[in-house]
Image (spheres, rainbow, N blue to C red):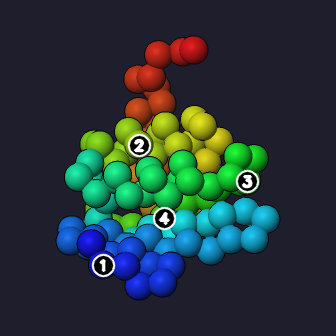
Amino acid sequence: MHCNGTELIFKRMLKIQRVGNREVAFTVSGQMDGENLAELKTLISSEANGRRIVLDLKDLILVDQGAVSFLERCEADGIELKNCSVYIREWVLQEQKRRPSD
């Protein structure tokens, strides 16, 4: 992992950039898998309660099952998934259908 200001770059080519005022937007690009989610989870949980969080996925090109499950949980917790590619959106919707009703 390499840290450069507000950008974090991971070995498996996951890049996270944070921007925020009233809402916090994390731009996620590259490849997201179960192995490189820990830092993103930490960044999200470190934000103040009540702040709107957005994950901008426009440059996310590859995900695995662990990443899709994570994204589905994020959306269920009120985090907006913005600019989600069609294949990722469809996969997240399939995860939502499999999730037991609360």
SS at badge 3: loop
The structure residue drawn at horizontal position 57% and vertical position 14%, both measured from the top left corner, is 102
Answer with mark 2 or mark 4, whichever residue precedes in sequence: 4
Report the Cα–Cα distance between label 1 and label 2.
Answer: 23 Å
Front position in the image: 42 or 37: 42
Please state which of the two labelled residues, at mark 1 or mark 2, is closer to the viewer: 1
Please state which of the two labelled residues, at mark 2 or mark 4, is closer to the viewer: 2
Report the Cα–Cα distance between label 2 and label 3.
Answer: 19 Å
Residue receiving disc 2: 70
Answer with mark 2 or mark 3, whichever residue precedes in sequence: 3
SS at badge 2: helix
Front position in the image: 22 or 47: 47
Q: Is residue 19 above or below residue 78?
A: below
Residue receiving disc 4: 57
Q: Amino acid at mark 1?
A: His
Residue receiving disc 1: 2
Along the horizontal axis of the image, is 26 left or right of 53?
left
Please state which of the two labelled residues, at mark 1 or mark 4, is closer to the viewer: 1
Residue receiving disc 3: 51
The structure residue drawn at horizontal position 54% and vertical position 66%, both measured from the top left corner, is 26
SS at badge 1: strand
The structure residue drawn at horizontal position 52% and vertical position 43%, both measured from the top left corner, is 74
